Amino acid sequence: MSAPLRRWEVSFVIGISRAPNNFGSPSFIRLYGETVDALRNAVSDYLKAYKPAYFDNNGDHIVGRKMYAYSNGQRALPHAWEAAMEDSQESYNRSFIQQVGWWDFSTRLVSGYEKLYEVSPYPTHLGSFEDAIEDFVTTALVPRKGPDYQSRALVDNQLQLPLLETVLREEDDYSINDLLRRGWHILALEYQGEVSKTGELTHRKANFVLGHADLPAGLATLEARDYAYYFNYS
């Protein structure tokens, strides 16, 4: 029996603690799946098998960076969280220590740099390990093209538009690069702006039109964008 195709891959960081007051040394993990659903299952099975005290999606400009940590009533906040929260870290450190269970903390990536979300910018208590895993594979997973990836929309190296399953528009250059890694194709470039009295387009802004040939993978991106938008602007 041949091995499953590694069409999709995901990378993330875990920390397995052997002491009660730390999260362990970080380990970089890379897993593969033939479909995005298989990738989600692989990540879920891996986390359940190794039971880390901390895991982190590494993030991209689509979903941002999401970090998960277990409070056992003794550990302080992870260092990455403390650095991001600055002045508020002391009060959240007290809450983290007092409320045992799993927490998550999200930041967004803007032009390659992490920034706090304007809405709900601090850690939230999730509860159980299973709740943390479900949130991770549902909202934080970053599926990228794997070693065996081949777009179904490319036939003889020609992009076949009827084979595309979903379309989106994006203007940010950093997000474009992350979308291409997620399997999106650039289809066109649209310009928006104001028309001057002479008929010229001023204050011009470019929008990339992109399409995806794998519906589940495309929907994973769209759902991640919707989640990030709601989280930041609701």
Image (cartoon, rainbow, N blue to C red):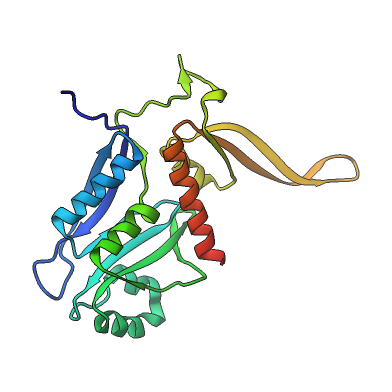
Query: Which percent across, then down, holds residue 84?
Result: 38, 71
**Which residue appears farthest toward the right when viewing the image?**
197
**Which residue appears farthest toward the left when viewing the image?**
18
Image-quadrant location for residue 4? top left
Which one is nearer the viewer's eye here, 90 or 73?
73
Q: Is residue 195 above or below residue 97?
A: above
Number of numbered discs overlaid on the protein picture: 0
Q: Is residue 5 above or below residue 79?
A: above
- Give the residue at x 33% y 84%: 90
Query: Which percent across, then down, holds residue 113?
Result: 44, 58
Query: Which percent across, then down, holds residue 79?
Result: 28, 71
Q: Is residue 176 left or right of residue 43?
A: right
Q: Is residue 55 above or below residue 155?
A: below
Query: Which percent across, then down, holds residue 213?
Result: 47, 30
Q: Is residue 54 left or right of residue 230?
A: left
**Which residue appears farthest toward the top when viewing the image?**
156
Image-quadrant location for residue 102? bottom left
Which one is nearer the viewer's eye here, 212 or 175?
212
Q: Is residue 97 left or right of residue 106?
A: left
- Give the position of the C terminus as an image quadrant: bottom right
